[in-house]
Structures are given as structure tokens and as C-alpha cells.
Amino acid sequence: MYDIGVECVDGSVDPGTNLLVVGPPMTGKRDLAFDILADGCRNGEGGIVVSTKDSARKVQQAFDERDPDATLGIVDCVSRQQGMEEEPETDLVRLASSPNDLTGIGIEFSELLQLFYSQRGIERNRMMMYSLSTLLMYSDLQTVFRFLHVSTGRVQSADGLGLFLVDETAHDEQTMSTIKQLFDGVIEVREADSGRECRVSGVE
């Protein structure tokens, strides 16, 4: 089981579980997912971040605040597209050409998962992908659905834990219903007077 003992989410899920993290912008979805990854990394698990919004450098900086010693793999989908100063590719930092390059993103993610599982002997791995909304800006729903079907399948076959983030206010109800079919549970993040509030399904 993967324990999820972070602020506003408490429970555990079976290996191979994929969770969709939904909510409006600026509600802390990314921070929540980082916290869940870091919680696992502190217990010797691997972490993989597929970022269509932030560069590898920004992802690493945000993660270092939580666990500077973590084994973290990153698929950076923005630096090349935006012409930013690139970090050199390493075993743990991979660069996709753009958020539109779903084939390339999938290959890099699979190779990182394989690297952790087979070469480094890390059999428990958590991954997050943010944001699905960016993917849907560049590709149609059917294409993104196929990509997510493969990605969630890889998490399942590797007995990992997958967290996929989406801004639900950016998409119509049909799009959200279609995407939700691929996931074992949903974490809904909302703003509340007391701070971040979560409603969880699929987590025991």
C-alpha cells in the first residue's frame, strides 16, 4: 500500500493506483501533489515529475524545499519550446520538445520509470503529471485520452502511484467525464476559510 498522509488527505491506496487531482487555479494542487511525492521519497521511494508548466530547474527547487535528498526524475516539457536556458539532460532530467510531443513525453517517462525500477532497484515509485490542462491546449481530447491511457497503464503495471493534475474550470463537463474514466480515484481541491480543503474518493 502507498500511504498518503499529508495535509487534508489521509489514507492509503493499492500499488498501481492512479489518482486525478482536480480543482480551480491557485488552490494548491501542485503543492499537494509535491507533498505526496516527497512523503514517499523520504521513505526511500522514487519520484517522477512530468511538467508541462515549469522547467526542470523550478521543479527541482520546489522539491528541494521538501526533500533535498530525494531521488527525483523530471521530464521537462517547456524549456526547449520556450527557448529557455536548458539544463543538460542527465539520467534523471529529460527534455521533451514541447507539451505537444506526447510520444516523446511518454518515452521519457517510461525510461525514467524503467531506470528507477530496473537499474536502481527502486520498486516503489510515485509520479505526478501537471498539468493535463496544458496537454489539452495543444492536443485534442481523443489524443490526450490515448496518451493518458498508456501513461496510467504504465503506472499500474509498475505498481506505482500516479497523480495527474487538471484545472477543471478550463474544461467542459464532457471532457472531465471522459478523463475521469481513466482514474481509480479523485482528489478535489478547494479554497476554504480555513485554507486548502480536499474531498477524496478512491482513497481508503
Image (tube, helix red, strand yellow):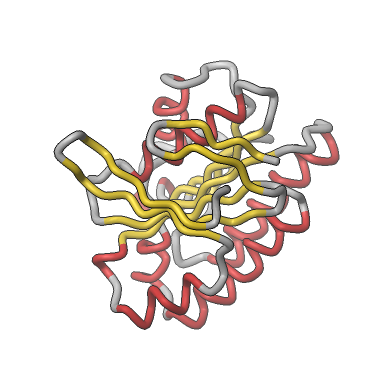
Q: Residue at x 47, y 72 (%)?
A: 179
The residue furthest left is: 193
| Residue 54 seen in the current view | yes
- Give the percent coordinates (x, y) of residue 119: 84, 36
Report which quarter residue 192 is drawn in. top left
The residue lying toward the viewer, choosing from 23 and 93, is 23
Q: Residue at x 61, y 30 (%)?
A: 40
- Looking at the rendering, which quadrant does residue 170 occupy? bottom left
**Could you tell me which quadrant the N terminus lies in?**
top right
Identify which residue is drawn at 64% across, 51% down. 109
Residue 177, placed above or below residue 118: below
| Vertical order, 85 against 199 (above or below) | above
Horizontal relation, residue 106 to residue 23: left or right: right
Residue situated furthest front in the rendering: 204
The residue under the point 26% across, 49% down is: 190
Total marks drawn?
Answer: 0
In the displayed structure, does residue 13 sit left or right of residue 21?
Answer: right
The x and y percentages for residue 98 are 45, 59
- In the image shown, does 41 or 7 lie closer to the viewer? 7
Q: Measured from the top left, where is residue 16 in percent x and y?
A: 70, 53
On the image, the x and y values in percent for residue 45 come to: 68, 30
Please determine whether, in this image, residue 171 is positioned above or below residue 125.
below
> From the viewer's perspective, is residue 199 above or below residue 100?
above
Does the image show residue 20? Answer: no
